[in-house]
Image (tube, coloured by chain):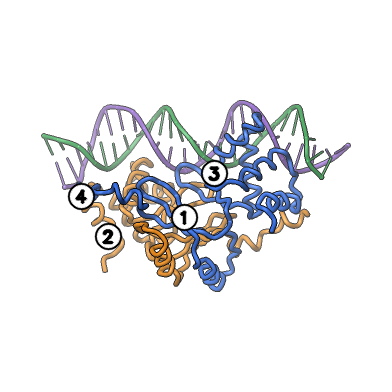
Chain colours: A blue, B orange, C purple, D green
Amino acid sequence: MTSRFEAMTEALRRANYRVTPQRLAICKLLASSKSHPSPAEVYEHIRRQYPTISLATVYNTLAVLRDLGEIIEIPGNAGGVRYETDLTPHANLICLRCGSITDLELDVFEKVRTEIDAAVPFALQGLRIDAFGVCPRCQASEVKIEENA
Amino acid sequence: MTSRFEAMTEALRRANYRVTPQRLAICKLLASSKSHPSPAEVYEHIRRQYPTISLATVYNTLAVLRDLGEIIEIPGNAGGVRYETDLTPHANLICLRCGSITDLELDVFEKVRTEIDAAVPFALQGLRIDAFGVCPRCQASEVKIEENA
DNA sequence: GTGACTGCAAAGCTTTTGCATTAGA
DNA sequence: TCTAATGCAAAAGCTTTGCAGTCAC
């Protein structure tokens, strides 16, 4: 099984995109990322190695990788775009109190995929299940916000 | 069963938000909307009836309704936020090319809910399934990237 | 060598904020 | 009355664009 990094760079080559040092650095970062980085975060991180890299280059590369299906755009509403770099099926448990995001593997992904495929001719590239609620930690300290009404 | 419009206005009242004419107009629009309107679209539409309404008011009201759980914010592509006004369980088929969003009912929602409940003590309040890919229309006009190889 | 990529800066969007005025409860 | 909500305008963010120089192929 090829690594995420190899898959990304191979995808670039296969589509005749130029494999520049900046792009390699971005691929490496994305491949090892366990969170959902924003363009700004990618920029800040790559800057350590390439101090002159520009945001335009970051946006360009992220768009290319997105078009190639190597990462998935998850527009965070007002704050800007974020990228899903982990393409293995999982749900995000998003806490409405503290904003934490916890990954959770589910068994139903194949079922969801199958249902969608059966319903429409949609070229499915990524699937995202978001569960909104209150995480265990916050449930403990959550007592009454509702009661003040 | 109460109408969407009534549910929205009732939610406003119950939470002690003021029920202004502008908010009523926005609720009415959202309740009857079958698409996924953006703030700008809501603004343009409401302006016909209230020519002096401001974008700030639209954003404010949409945020309130979102906080009340009456509408859901969904990823629009780079253009900005869109709102889901249909709260019945369904997946969003989001086209990565044109940004179109198509609703699709699924049978697996209960299963997903059950799996999450079984896995972690997470106080689940909402569930969203987003499918990212390329819609049929865009698949047709999609030619370039692959053929340059 | 050639054309895609980079970096820089400015422009273009969407969304938020500050504040005086208005009006819902 | 009392304060949240409105409308206006300016500010703040995020993303895109134009262009000259550079570098992958």
Residue at point 69%, 38% (across, down): A22
Q: Nearer the viewer, mark 2 or mark 1?
A: 1
Tell me the CA gap for discs 2 and 1.
28 Å
Which quadrant of the view contains residue A118? bottom right
Residue at point 68%, 51% (across, down): A8
**C4 on left or right of C11:** right
> Which kind of residue does numbered mark 2 sit on?
Ala
Residues at discs 3 and 4 in contact (Cβ within 8 Å): no
Tell me the CA gap for discs 4 and 2.
21 Å
Q: What crowding class fits label 4: few (fewer than 14 Cα within 10 Å), some (14-19), or many (20 or more)?
A: few
Q: From the viewer's side, name the closer residue of B40 and A113.
A: A113
Q: Determine whether the residue tagged by mark 3 lies in a helix, strand or loop.
A: loop
Q: Which residue is mark 2?
A: B7
Q: Which residue is mark 3?
A: A37
Chain under numbered label 4? A
Q: Nearer the viewer, mark 3 or mark 2?
A: 3
Q: What crowding class fits label 3: few (fewer than 14 Cα within 10 Å), some (14-19), or many (20 or more)?
A: some
**D10 on left or right of B95:** left
Chain under numbered label 3? A
> Which kind of residue does numbered mark 4 sit on?
Glu
